[in-house]
Amino acid sequence: MRRLWLIAILFGCFIAQDAHATMSGKPIKIGVLTDLGGMLTENTGQGSVAAAQLAVEDFGGAINGIPIEVISADHQNKPEVGADIARRWYDEGVTMIVDVPNTAVALAVQKVAQEKNRIVMFSGPAGSVLTGTACTPVSVHFTYDTYALAHVTGAAIASGGAKTWFFMTADYAFGATLEQETTSVVKANGGEVLGSVRFPANNVDFSSVMMIAQQSNAEVLALTSAGIDTKNAISQAADFGVLQSGRKLAILLLAIDDVNGLGLPVTQGIMLTDAFYWDMNDETRAFSKRFFAKRSVMPNMYQAGVAGAVTHYLKAVQAVGTEQADEVMAKMRDLPVNDFMTKNGKLREDGRVVRDMYLFQVKSPAESKGRWDYYKLVKVVPGDQAFRPLADGNCPFVKK
């Protein structure tokens, strides 16, 4: 009996050691897969890398004496490049990939993550399909999505009395999805969509787009794009006198670095949806001060979301004592999401992090007290109103 008892103890120790094999001393590797040289690089890029590093610093650079490493790569806004990097990283021991701006790239990386049973946490991409029909048990959509953009900014403008809309839509997955979801909001508020015009990624000349949009005579000209396309479109809308004509310009995705680059005289009055603003409270200001020391700019929601995602992941790893995907995902769903940008958020079964979202308006030059003092809060939208209900997403592994 004594011998059997000893065997049982040794067997139990072996099982426990095997279950926590990934904490055996090898560095915990986090891969920031982002846009380091394309149309989204100002919004994500090295800023996303810096944000991940700040989150790791908060853990002292290690968990239980095991160092945490942050590596990065450029997916070049190409799904095949992103998928190849993800596959190689996972094979080399990366246990979590974060950021992945560009919905098409995110979809490709998500498939690899499921194949390898490794975790991916999205901050940069917006497509709500990531927690819909394309959802996986190992992916997290952390920061925002197209549904929230449509149901915060879109709903605010649509319910304000403007009834006719025309879309200027980026001709890629994000733009098409955002147009579709905002159209639903417009119609639900008794409005009408008169048409749309598509433009390619990295578009430089918006003159024909603006002419077609203005000829529609719609009350609202809605822009569904991101990054440099958004900046170019807003700049040229000002040149074409769109706002002076009495029409509303609905910018459905805008980052604070875009506002900083364009200036308040051009962007004043624009309504926007955001998950984060640097000057909301002491915690956001403290994080942003550290970020500014690294990057000389204030962080936007994509970059803040990277820090939040890495923080939540490392909390879960620390709690379960392993990097095994199933155990970490279960713990991340169990733990409330609490950090400098999110309070009492919840990771749902479909991978969606449900948090409060914010409707802001860009200040006028007279209202601003200086550089980066750009937003005034219009409305806090609770997470259960901002994000799509779980039952409506058609995530294949969520029980009906």
Image (spheres, rainbow, N blue to C red):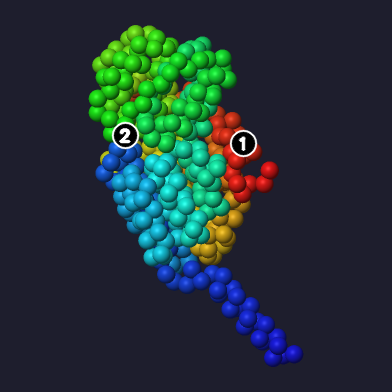
Q: Quadrant of the N terminus?
A: bottom right
The residue lying toward the viewer, choosing from 299 and 207, is 207
Asked if the residue at tag 2 contacts the one at tag 1, i.e. Cβ–Cβ closer than 8 Å, the answer is no
The residue pinned by badge 2 equals 201
In the rendering, at what x and y percent does residue 384 appear?
60, 34
**Residue that mark 1 sits on:** 392
The mark that comes first in sequence, 1 or 2, is 2
Does residue 146 appear anywhere in the picture? yes
Q: Residue at x 51, y 40 (%)?
A: 129
Please, what is the three-letter code of the amino acid marked with disc 2?
Answer: Ala
Instruction: Find residue 205 and report its horizontal and vertical position in percent.
Output: 24, 25
The part of the image, by quadrant, that contains residue 343 is top right
Q: Residue at x 68, y 43 (%)?
A: 400
Binning the other alpha carbons within 10 Å of mark 2 as few (below 14), some (14 to 19) or many (20 upward) gives some
Spatial CA span between label 1 and label 2:
30 Å
Above or below, 180 against 103 in this view is above
Provide residue 387's location: percent of width, then percent of height. Answer: 56, 34
**Residue 176: mark:** none
Element type at mark 1: helix
In the rendering, at what x and y percent does residue 103 appear? 42, 41
Residue visible at 69% across and 91% down in the picture: 3
Q: Say what amino acid the circle numbered 1 marks.
A: Asp
Q: Secondary structure under badge 2?
A: loop
In-image side of 136 versus 400 (left or right): left
Give above or below for 127 relative to 232: below
